[in-house]
Image (tube, grey):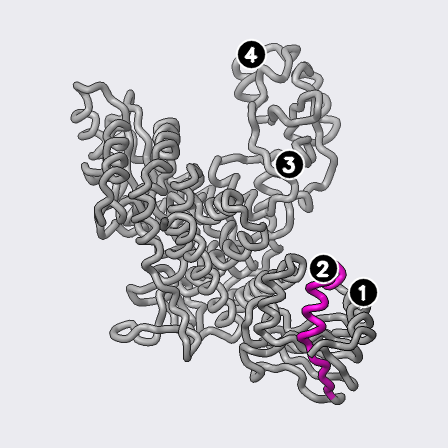
Amino acid sequence: MTAPPLILEATIRFLRSHEPFARMARRDLEFLVSRARLAYFAAGSVVVDAASGADCPLHVIQRGHVRSTDPTAPGHATVLGPGECFPLATMGHALPASTSFVATEDVFCYQLGAEDCAALRAASAPFAEFCAQSLRALLHQSHGQVRHAFSRRAVDQQTLLQPVRALLRRAPVSCAAATPVRSALERMNAEGVGTIAVVDAAARPIGIFTLTDLMTRVVLPGRDLSLPIEEVMTRDPGAVDEETTAEEAIAVMAAHRYHQLVITRNGALSGVVSERDLFALQRVSMQRVIETIHGARDVAALGRAAADITTLADNLLAQGAAAEPLTHTIAALNDALTLRLFELLAPAHELAGIDWCWLSLGSEGRREQTIASDQDNALVFEAGAADVEAVRARLLRFAQAANRALATLGFPLCPGNIMAGNPAHCLTVDEWRGRFAAWLREPAPEALLAANIFFDFRPLGGHAALAEGLRRWLVEVAPESRIFLRLLTTNALAAEPPLGVVRSFVTEDGIYKGTIDLKADGTRIFVDAARALALAFGIAETGTAPRLRLAGRRLGLEERETGALTDAFHFLQLLRLRAQRGHVGDETGPVPHAAPNRIDPYALNELDQRMLKEALRQARGLQKTLELTLAR
């Protein structure tokens, strides 16, 4: 029914005084007003609650106030007034309400049905953007529940989610490259610091000079204190932007063995933070993990560090760490552990003079490791034609020792033997190119399976240039392999998100009755789709989230759409970590069986069930995008 002109104009004027309606086109407001109905709720009556169902309409308060209570935050309530909308979760994603809304006085609300709400989202970008925020709001609520669940394991710690600028206690101490060492030392002494940053004319950091540099590069070699500091400084210091979180800074420090990080603002020096600054934020010490790794003199000592990494993961979960930086931190520490293992093993093997690079594959290559990840690795090397087999034999002895040692450190041997100690995966650069080219040219089923693991490679130990050259070559040739890409896309579309028609989720029968596999039926969909898009568009990134962000730009997706995809992927990753550490449903300890990625979705709390459903819907939407893009 069309509203009378006076009522139409009065309602539009009312809506235009509130967000997001103030930014919406008139035709979309007219649509809203023509489809909405005005509903009355007496004081004390329930407007919306958990029983309202998935088809609950959008409510816009026209008059009066409504109190909302969140079951995830007992004792806390929010009062909504004229112009405000609820329930946001339902509004954004057609999900059942998680919060009860009760009229505190006589209330009038405009109600817009779920189908009309969906049509309005499709027509109005400002309204769709406003709705999209509900997924992030749900994710924040879920993180809050994770913090509560894991706090029983964690010691009291300050948050690692704050930006590193919060750790800066003073203005940075710096000097120019031409400054004499003596003058720099006098400045350091006067300021009471052990580090001075060296900057260019635009205040961009180009180096760093510490008391360790003084000892090793000036005092012991007997060099003159009048020489310019640029001759003895450490060049290209580790640097991060001041908005980088503390946990991300720790991951960078762990990956590169930095003792200090230069902090920048828009590229210019902002300050310097040390290990002590970052480690002071926690008492399950990242410092202890790194010190144990670097100080290890045998594999047994590295085993203690591996156990600490698992404990640290628990405590980062307790602090509310997001999935992406958390898995990156786990990957960075595992990288440091592996590199130290290489150092311990190298003296027993004849590696001198060999140009080699250890490749991390699969989830390790994507920096998306969870606690239960097994080994996926390979080797690439260069050698003269006459020396290939002799060099391969030497590398295989080293790789097999490394694979066995990693297994004792908690990284299970790959059941498919996709490891560097397998002669089939210890190849020269030309041999790897030949193998990749064969997979691209004649994509048999085994080639597609292998591509899902091998094409996510990244360098870990040895000469990274070998892997980087191989990546550049693959990025150039893959987009032209149309048949391979089409079959890879078909393979990526094979997984069906376990969403039900009658019930919320489709669970399995048999030995895993009542469960779903968060990896095979969840994260795998995002990983496979992102890989196919990356190969098609010539994207060199290996991580799933970066691939989705870059592919989204190529596809012309809005940032909110790409953000919803990455948020959904990260929620599934976080749920996997929680399952593996024993905090899904009523479990109280780490998963004891051989299916660490399986959960009973109905054992989740209401909030996590809704988030899981939406994440799987996003997976289905990504598959549709992939099909339209590459399955032609």
Q: CA distance from mark 1 to mark 3?
A: 42 Å
Q: CA distance from mark 3 to mark 2?
A: 43 Å
Q: Secondary structure at mark 4?
A: loop
Query: Which residue occupies 56% across, 22% down?
Result: 215
Q: How many marks?
A: 4
Image quadrant in which the N terminus is located: bottom right
Mark 4 and mark 2 lie on one chain; the one further toward the N terminus is 2
Query: Which residue occupies 69% across, 19% down?
Result: 176
Q: Which-is-in-front pick, marks 1 and 4? A: 1
Left or right of 443 on screen, residue 247:
right
Could you say where residue 283 lies in the image, as x and y percent from the top left? 55, 53
Could you say where residue 630 lies in the image, as x and y percent from the top left? 39, 48
According to the picture, the residue beneath numbered tag 3 turns out to be 263
According to the picture, the residue beneath numbered tag 4 turns out to be 222
According to the picture, the residue beneath numbered tag 2 turns out to be 25
Q: Which mark is residue 17?
A: 1
Label 2 near label 4: C-beta < 8 Å? no
**Residue 454 visible in the displayed image:** yes
Mark 1 and mark 2 lie on one chain; the one further toward the N terminus is 1
Label 2 near label 3: C-beta < 8 Å? no
